[in-house]
Amino acid sequence: MSKSILIIDDDNKLNELLQEYLGKNNFITTAVENPKDGLVKLKNNHYDLIILDVMLPDMDGFETVKQIRKDHETPVVMLTARGEVTDKVVGLELGADDYLPKPFEPRELLARIQSVLRRSELKLKKNENIMLKELVVDPNKRSATYHNKDMELTSTEYELLLLFVKNNGKVLSRDEIMQNTRGISWMSFDRSVDVMVSRLRNKFKSLGSKKDKEQVIKTVHSIGYMFFLEEAGK
C-alpha cells in the first residue's frame, strides 16, 4: 500500500525533485512552500510522514514541529542547510523523528523515511486497546466492541474502522480512504467506499443505546466522511 508524505519546504525545485523521486518509489506526495499551508493540509488530510525544512518563511521548522505535535503523532523528518548539532538536538527534543542536513542524496532520505516508517509501525503494533466513548478497538485481535457488544466486523470493515479511529475528528476523502486502508482492493469507479461506510455506520446504529443519538460517521458533502467519538472518560 502506498504511503502518503507531506513535504513542507520553500525550495520549489527541491519539492519537485522529491515528488518525482518518491513517486517512483511508491509514495504519494503533497508539497507546500509555506508552513501555515502545511498545517492546514495536515488538519484536513491524513499523512503517514512529514518532511519538514527548518528554514521556512513566517514560521521556522522548529515552531512548525511544535505546532504539529500539539495534535498529531505523524512521524517528522527535518531538513536543514545548517548541519549544526544544536539544530539536530533541538529538532529531536521538539518531537522530530529524524534529521537530515542539506545537501543530501535522495537515496539517503528514502532510507531515513523507510526507517522512520518501520519504527512508527512497530509502535502501532505494540499499542494497547484504543478506547473512545463506548468503543474499544483491539489491534491484537483485530476486533472492536461498541457499548460492550461485539461489532462482528469483517476484515474490510475493521481496516476502515481503524483508519477512522486513527483520524478521529478529521475529514477523510474517498481517495484517502482508498489509499490508506491496507489490503483492500477498492473499485475506483463505483461506490464501494460509500457502501462499506454505510455498513459500518449501520453497525454503530444497531449497537448504540437509545440515549445515543450521535452520528458516529458523518457524511461531508462533496468531500468524504468524518468519524468522531470523544475519548473514553470525557
Image: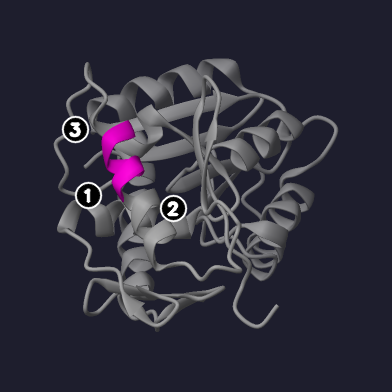
Of tags 1 and 3, the one toward the viewer is: 3
Residue drawn at (57%, 55%) of the image: 228
**10 Å neighbourhood of mark 3: few (<14), some, or many (≥20)?**
some
Q: Which residue is disc 3 drawn over?
A: 186
Figure quadrant of the C terminus: bottom right
Q: Is residue 114 left or right of residue 50?
A: left
Q: Which residue is disc 1 drawn over?
A: 182
**10 Å neighbourhood of mark 2: few (<14), some, or many (≥20)?**
many
Residues shaded magenta:
194-199
Q: Position of residue 211 (x, y in %)?
A: 61, 69
Which of the pair 29/54 is nearer the observer? 29
Could one spot residue 49 in this view of the protein?
yes
Q: Position of residue 88 (x, y in %)?
A: 63, 61
Q: Which residue is disc 2 drawn over?
A: 164
Identity, as a three-letter code, of the amino acid under mark 3 = Trp
Q: Vertically, is 135 above or below 224?
A: below
Residue 132: mark: none
Of tags 2 and 1, the one toward the viewer is: 2
Q: Position of residue 35 (x, y in %)?
A: 72, 34
Could one spot residue 112 in this view of the protein?
no
